[in-house]
Amino acid sequence: MMLKHSRLIESIYFFVLSRLVFGIENNALIRLSILKGKKIVGLLNQWDSLWYVDIIKHGYMVVPLSQPPELVGQADWAFFPLFPLSAKVLYWCGIPAAWAGIVVNQIAFFLCIWLFIRLMEKLVNYSQAKFTTLIFALTPFNIFISASYSDTVFLLFSLLAFTNLQQEKYWSAALSGAFLSASRFFGILFLASYAYNIFIRKRQMPSLKIGIQMLIISSGLLLFMLYLYCHVGDALAFYHIQQAWGHTGVDWLSNPLRALNVTFMSGNTYAKWFFILAFIWIPYLVRKKLYEYALFAGLSLLAPVVLGTLWSFTRYSLSMFMFYVVIGMVTEKNQSLRYLALIITLILHFAFYMLWMTGDVAVI
């Protein structure tokens, strides 16, 4: 009981620290002449946040937009429902839609910190677990935690799903997986990690119970597909609407080198670096025999690449808790690497906030 209480206090400490850093940064940035007079909620809720706020207020669209010209043909069907539905509960309680998603993310991130420090204790020593949680709390990903984006909810249920999977609480893992597949399309890829754990690691034979659990994991996506079919007549509308953003895919079969070049050049500087890093930290998970982690992270980051784009690759990488697990394991026995990891984290943390607040798309 005392141990659980201690982890709760530590989680509160790391969460408060991350919010204090956020407050100091915002106070500094708001004082910049180009940001003076602008409201903080408007600075935070940019780009995809605006789509989520609209879903929170009005629900999903029936037909794509016909105006303004730059948005013609686009629709909100690409955005999975768990996050806006969670925020809608707060909206119904009287919290403005622009703030509801932000509040949901603060709650979700606190729970992420609490789950993460407990997970890291099983992988590294206690002191290193606390250090890694500090990196996790101060991650450059904080900007998406502070805005109305679905990534924090995705992060929360991926932590829950894998925590339950490791503890062999398969029904709880399946339920967490259901919420995961309702938060982002990549969530359905938890099926691969579940199947590996069940059929390869535990050497179980297929059974009705396993089939039901796999169906539960898929239910978040399946229910969203059913809703889209009833709402707009296309169960795959979340995929088909990607064309409106120019995500039409590339031909990997006939000319893979050209496809790789097109994909790589589609990303901004941060995305390219995180793409290169993925070839390091995901194999490291394999080396450490964390196969379930490697499967989920590898497949999730492969998905956008298959479409021929590195757009949002930075955000997708930083929303993988496995990324921070690798940082914790790599720096465990090297003080210099710990300092370096912390310095890079703080620099990128501030850089991402500054770019986001000033309307630079480099962070997305």
Image (cartoon, rainbow, N blue to C red):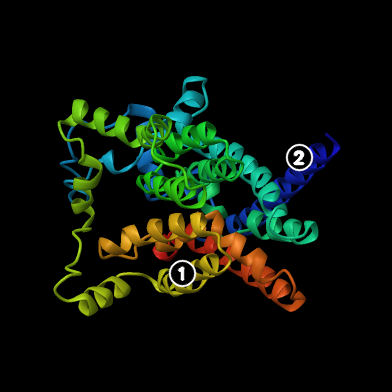
The label shown at residue 8 is 2
**Residue found 35% across the figure and 62% down from its top:** 302
**Residue found 35% across the figure and 45% down from its top:** 185
Label 2 sits on a secondary structure element that is helix
**Residue found 73% across the figure and 57% down from its top:** 129
Q: 10 Å neighbourhood of mark 2: few (<14), some, or many (≥20)? A: some
**Residue found 73% across the figure and 51% down from its top:** 17
Q: How many labels does the image show?
A: 2
Residue 362, picture quadrant: bottom left
The residue where tag 1 is placed is: 278
Figure check: 153 above or below 272: above
Instruction: Evaluate if marks 1 and 2 touch, with contact meaning CB atoms under 8 Å apart.
Output: no
Q: Can residue 32 be seen in this view?
A: no
Q: x, y percentage for residue 87?
A: 47, 31
* Left or right placement of residue 66 versus residue 329 in this view: left
Amino acid type, label 1: Ala
Furthest residue toward top: 93
Of pointers 1 and 2, the one earlier in the residue sequence: 2
Residue 285, picture quadrant: bottom right
Figure check: 185 above or below 251: above
Amino acid type, label 2: Leu
Marks 1 and 2 sit apart, C-alpha to C-alpha, by: 32 Å
Q: x, y percentage for residue 315?
A: 45, 58
